[in-house]
Every structure is written in C-alpha cells, then in structure tokens.
Image (spheres, rainbow, N blue to C red):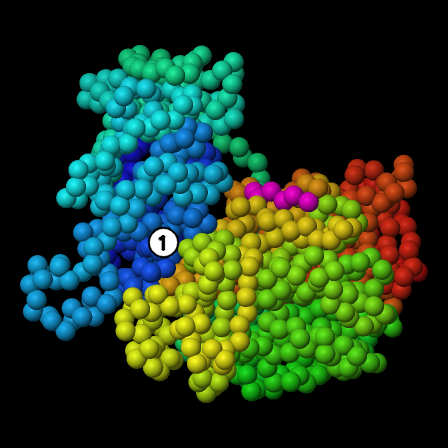
Amino acid sequence: GLPDLYVCNDFQTPDRLWINQGFGKFRLIKRSAIKVSSYSSMGVDVGDLNRDGMDDFMVVDMLSRTHRLKMTQRVEAAPSIQTTGEQIWDRPQVSRNTVYVSEDHGQYAEVAHYAGLSATEWSWAPVFMDVDLDGYEDILIGNGHAQDNLDKDTLQSRSQFPNDSPQQLAIAFPALKTPNLAFRNMGQMRFKETGSAWGFESNQVSNAIALGDLDNDGDQDVVINCLNAPALVYENISQRARVAVRLKGRPGNTRGIGARISLIEAAFTQSQEIIGGGRYLSGDQAQRTFALTRPSNEKKRIEVRWRSGLLSTIQGIEANHLYVIHEPESSVAKRQGEGPKDARATLFREVSSVNKQHHATVKPDSRQSQPTWPLDRSTLGEALAWIDMDTDGDEDLAVSGGSKASAWLTNKGKENFENKIERKGMKSRSGESGFASAPLNNSPGLLAIPQQSDPTAANALIHWMADGAEKEITKLPAGAYGPLAVSDVDNDGDLDLFVGGQSPWGNFPVSSDSLLLKNEHGDFEVDETNATSISRLHNIQGAIFCDWDLDGDSDLITSSEWGKIRWLINEKGTFNEQNKGIGSEKFRGIWQGLASGDFNEDGRPDLVVCNRGENTQWAQWRTDRFRLYYSKTIRKHETITFRSYFNRDQWLPISPLEDVSTWLTDANMRFASHADYASRSQEEILGDFLHEFEYLEIDTLETVILLNLPNGIEKVALNPVAQWAPCFGPTVADFNNDGHEDVFLSQNLDTGNHEWGRMDAGHGLLLLGDGEGSLNAIPSTASGIRLKNEQRGTATADFNQDGKMDLAVLERGEGAHLFVNQTEHTGVTVSLEGPSANPHCIGARLQKINLQTGNVYGPAKEIQSGSGYRSLNSLKHVFAHPGKAFQIQVTWPNGKISRHSIPSGITKVTLQQP
C-alpha cells in the first residue's frame, strides 16, 4: 500500500527501484529481484498488463525496429556481464527496452523480447492506456530525436575533426524522425504494433505524452509535446462501454494521488493508480477510465483503496458514467485485514543436505577459440543420473562435475546423501556430457561420456561400476559427444547404445558424427548396418529410444541444435528416417533436450522438446526464419559464423559491419559506409566468399509438445511462461499423483555477451498435465522450486520410496539440488526385473487397467535409459493409486504381455518378466 519509486538513469548509471518502508524510509530492491536493466533509460510506466492483479512495468531505451538503423546506429557499451558464482546477481545493462512482469514471490521476469516491445526507436515516454477499451492496457510510445547522435558513419567522420564546435557537430548528424508507436495488448503479455491502424504514427520528435478526458466522454485522449513543432492532440474515438472515475480526497491529497482504483467484473479485475507526474516531462489528469467487458446485467463494482488505508466500494456500476468518489471520513470504512495467507505446503521441498555437496565449477570460455560465435558452449554441460549403484535397494545420484571431478552421492536414507566417490578419470576430461545405464558382463553400473574441449583428443565410453572403479570400455573417434540412450534395438536380448555427436569447441556448428554401438557379448561395436543414417545426426542435444509406432521395437528420436527433430523408425534392426511421413519436416529449431510421455493418454508416446523460447534477441528481428552461415576454410583452426534473418524477400545480416570486418579482410573496401553495408543483402555482403559457406536454417523457437496422433504430429506450443526463457532439460512424471503426466523444465541461458544478454527469466518451471494434451504452468510459490541460475540436467526418482516422484536439478555454479515430493497423494512405485542382459527391462511399456472394463487407461509409461538433457531418470515408474486394487499391463522387451494385480495400501511393487 506504500508508493515505491523507480528512477530512470541515462547511460551507465544504473536505474534504481526504491521500495518504500514507511515512515519516510526507502530501501533498494534486492538485486536478485530484477536481473537486467536498460542502459539508456528514458521513461517508465507501471500497470497490470496481464491482469493478474500485480503491477508490471516498462522502461524504454533507444533500440531501433528497422534494419537500416540497427546496422548504422552504435550500440552503447555497457559494463561487462558477470555470470557465475557470487557475481550472478550483477545486474547488467542492455541497450534495449525492458518489460518486467511481476511474479508472486516479489521477483520480476524480464520479457520485452517475448512481448514484442524490446525495440521502439529512440523512445522517451511509454504510456499504459486501454485505447480500444477491451479491458487490457495498451502501450503508446513517443520517440525521435533532433539528430541521430548514434550514427556510426557520422561518429567516425567526427573523430577526424575533434575541434569542431557543438553547432558544427549537431549539423553533421542526420535527423532522426521515426513514427510514434502504438501496441495493442493481445493478452498473455503479447503486443501487436497498431500505430498506423489507430492513427498514431506521427514522425515528429515526441518527448512528452499526457492523458486526459478532453471531451468529457469518459475515455482518455492524448496530448503530445513535440520538439520544434506544434503539439499533437488525439481524440479517443472508441465506442465501447466504459466508466470514468475521479477521486475527491481529504485535505492534503484532494485528488487521491496514490489511491488504487479497481473495477471488479466476473471476467477479471482491472486496477489503476492515480499518479501525480511520473511521465517524461508530463503528467496526466487525475482521472481513470475502465472498460466494461461484461454484459450490462452482470454485477460490477468499483473499489478504491485510499492512501489513508480506507476502502470505498460502489456497487451496481452502470456503463458510460463518470463516478466521482469521495474519501470517507469514518474509520469504520477501513478495510479489514486480508487474514492469514494460505499455508498449504508446496509440491516440492528442497533437501538442504545435498545442495552444496557437489559444486559444479566453471570451465574455460569456449569463445576464445571461436570469437565469431557469441555463445560460450562450455555453459551447456552437465548431466545427472539416478541409479542404485551400491545395490542396496534405494537410488543414488551421479552428478557430472563441469571442470570439477564428477561425483556419486550415495543415498544413506532419511534424505541424507554421502559424497562417496569423486571420479577424476582422464586428464583432458571435464565432467560427463551424458549418462545412461546398461549392465556389462553382468556388472551393474553407469555409462558415461567425458566432455572434451580439444577436438583432436581421443575420447572413450566409460563404465562406472558399483565398487567405485571405472573402466574405459570402448574408444571413440576424436570429437565431442553428448547425450546417450540405451535400448535393445535388434531384439537380441542385450542393450545397445546411441552416442550423440556434438560440436567441438571452436567449430560450431560443425559436428562430430553420431554413433550406434551394438552390444556384442558385452563389447560395444559400431553398427555398420546403420552407420550411414546415424552418422548424419549432428549437434545432438537430446536422444531417446521409445516405441513411437507401437510395433514392438525401439525407435530413435533425436533433437539437434540448429536442426531438426528426427524420427528414425526401427524396422527389424534397421533405422529409416521418416520425418516427412509424420509431418515434422518443418520443425527446425535450436532444440535442446527431449523426453517422451503420453500426455493425451491415447497409449502413444508424445514428446516434449526444449527450445530457445520466444524471449531472446531473435525476437527483435520480427521473423521466424533465421540462418547460420559457417565456413571452415576462411580461417585456419576456426569456424567462421555469420547470422542472418529473412525480411520480406531477402536475407539480411544480423551481424554488423564491425563484426564482419574481423574476418572479411576487404570489408572496408567493399562497403563505403555503415549505411552502404545496411543496404546490402547477405548474398551481396559475402560476395565471392559465399561459395565457402554452408548454412543451417531454423523456423521454430518455441518449446513444444508434439502429440503423436494417428494421422501425424500435432505441434502445440507450451504455456507462454515456458517461452520466457530457454529450456534445456525436460523431465516427465506424474508429480502430483493425479493420474496425468506432468513436466519439469530446466531453464535459463546466461551468455555473458552484451548482444545476446541474459536469457534467464525462468526459475525451473513445473507444468501440470490434464490428460488431454495440455500442460498448465504453476508458480514457484506452489511448486517450491525456485532456482536463480542456469539449470541443465534434470532427473526424477522416488529416492525415499514413499510412492512419490522426487526431482534432482543441476544448477550451474551451485551443483545438484534435490527436491522432495510432498504431494498429499501417494502412488505405487513399480520396478521391473528381467534377465541379466537387461535386468531393469529397458524398453518395457506399462499402463493401468480398468478392472470393470478390462481396458487400459491413463498414460502409458516406458522404461528408458537416457532422456531429457543428457541425463538418466530412475528405471522405475510411479503410478497414481486410485485408492483401490487395480491392475498394470506390461508389454515386456521380449514381446510378451502380462497383467498384474496391485492391491490397495502398498507404495511399491516389483514385477517379474515372464
């Protein structure tokens, strides 16, 4: 109820948000609450943009929407971005607008890219106003400047004449007249530019905007003060129903400054504050307008929470009226307290004893060996695995260690874990890039692939064994490898291995070939039958085996960074890619981990696949088609990269001239100026070098669900909140034991690069399934999961054997976090036992049986080794318990089908393969 204060500061002086403590005292907001701020902040406005009852805000900067100005304007340099350890909360500044969505734990998610609001030209004043009276506040922005002081060509020529007078310098810069912008609020934090449609597109330099009801028709009109030009006056001509509210406060605050007005309807609540000043060089009339979005016969009311703490309520609101509300005098009108907050437990609780036991340290920056690629690939590491290494009946946790030795955390019971063994292994190795489980020579253990920063160094498949020893079991070609997946692909009873090829440091996106290794009496050998089709799988970030076509054998599905999701269908041990046949040929993205789950409960495996999301720097180019050109021949020992985007009918560069000049040796001779460069297509820029480049193209940035339907694949973008940050590791389980599969997503990418910035609006996201193919995000205050840094590997297991799936998440710079599931519903943990060559029955498929009808129901679940982001989930599944006896149908790896009765009152059961 106390007014807080946001202060915009231009250039390197950071913005400040002061939180009112009362009694005239303020404190700075926690650094962790806001992770990034605008560099050249001009103006700010505050309002409830997504109608969730909490105020959001926007700060405007100077980034252009046009290709020409993006290439010709200098991007102001900001302090370097600190990325790890205690420095994670250094708040970098970015040369673009920032939009902050209020979250229910006092934090803000920065979503300007997702909202479509990151670039609005040289902006001065954002104004939140419901222009079209649909109940959602739209945004008006005034922009422009007398001259373009960021023009690179003028700045370069100016440097040759340092003694010119200010008047001469001002004349030298070109004028900067850009159209003012209006953005319609489309809901769910999406905005569409509608300046032309609304008649709000003057190109006068527009510094100050003020709102007021100039014609007393109940809506807000707009007045703009222009530089060296007459003012602009806009009449709001919307005909929709509305009410206007004006306050009459007591002496000392007669206009009710600081009071919050709420219009409460059945659909949602609209709320606004009365502010005094606050806009860039301007202030509004002390009156607010609200849309009436529901039929006139529905009940509506207005509430006013005055700064004095009093509450006024007006019932029976009628359309197209002005309500003048007087602040009450009586203390009887004081609002009652809100009462105690809901004290229900969160779904997960973190186990503190595991959090710091294994601290994953940071590896060297890979950009040192590839300066033209702005992403540090060393941050894409590490993996987790749940496996009963000591065969004592409960599951232990293996943790990849980054540059530190990996660890095996032994489950000692009662939520205690002991760091049993640190595995140091090969000298050139820095942690594991993938885990899977397979017994070799009747010895249980864990398969691992070491990470390599040297593309010429030898690599090998490592077998971790229960006694702490590790053994190099198969040498691999020199290169980089990532995810592992295990299954019996040839139906001979033993387990075979897929090894996903990745890009070595300094060579992105050039990739090592993937491998399929067949198990021949305990030795892994390259499968020559499938060598050609498998070797074409490059930059693999996720891989799983599952029976996609339900024909009884294991198919292979992979996800590629800057590539496709590929389906290799198993036909009697031979894999054939069938992307076109199932309608997925256009799904090209910056794909990361993937996992399967029966989300619509039709018995077929569906997919959740992680992607970069829609809240990244790619959004500012306003297209869904991007290319990454790369050349291995221009510079020795380095792969040169060049990014472009599709604009109308041509490909245009994303990289500015100064970046291209670092490798295009004659760039200064090719292009007369930055303006000349900005006018060229990508083909013209590369010129004679074009034939030395190959390219990859993407058209999808969303994290998605892919539903496996009889007539092909249906792509469904995940909940908008899932698109606010890059996602890496999906983990599928019925976390709340309601009988439907849920998903946890590890999130965030902190590039340490000024151009790309921090893509870290996520905290680790839990989405609950409804059994019909939809997943609904729940806030961290309900999930109990809130991680501040980059998360990578995730894995799930019922480690405490209570019939609830727990969760482990690896956070960069922090190590492994273990979250105990404390849902009130208890399920049944089901284990399978098979022959020694496949003791956990990897490849088996389980589903519940309705005892009344005899039909299967609920989600089908598969036993998989290798899933998500390079990680290994438990080889056991938890089924929601209906509260009475039920049956489980198992389709075993040997093709047999059996049904097993599960009595009520138990939390775990072991089933034997017939």
Residue 616, given in percent of the width and then of the height, sits at 45, 56
The residue nearer to you, when weighing 469 against 545, is 545
**Secondary element at image label 1:** loop
Q: Is residue 284 left or right of residue 293?
A: left
Which span of residues is magenta-colored? 773-778
- Figure quadrant of residue 719: top right
Q: Main secondary structure of the magenta part?
A: strand
The residue drawn where x is 82% and y is 49% is 847
Residue 639, given in percent of the width and then of the height, sits at 48, 80
The residue drawn where x is 64% and y is 85% is 477
Determine whether 889 is above or below 69 in the image. Answer: above
The residue drawn where x is 8% and y is 66% is 164
The residue drawn where x is 85% and y is 60% is 551
Q: Is residue 117 visible?
A: yes
Which three-letter amino acid code belongs to the residue tagged 1?
Arg
- Quadrant occupied by the N terminus: top left
Count of numbered labels shown in the rendering:
1
- Figure quadrant of residue 262: top left
Q: Is residue 774 magenta?
A: yes
Residue tagged 1: 65
Residue 297, given in percent of the width and then of the height, sits at 52, 13
Q: Is residue 388 visible?
A: no
Residue 553, given in percent of the width and then of the height, sits at 83, 64
Determine whether 20 is above or below 422 in the image. Answer: above
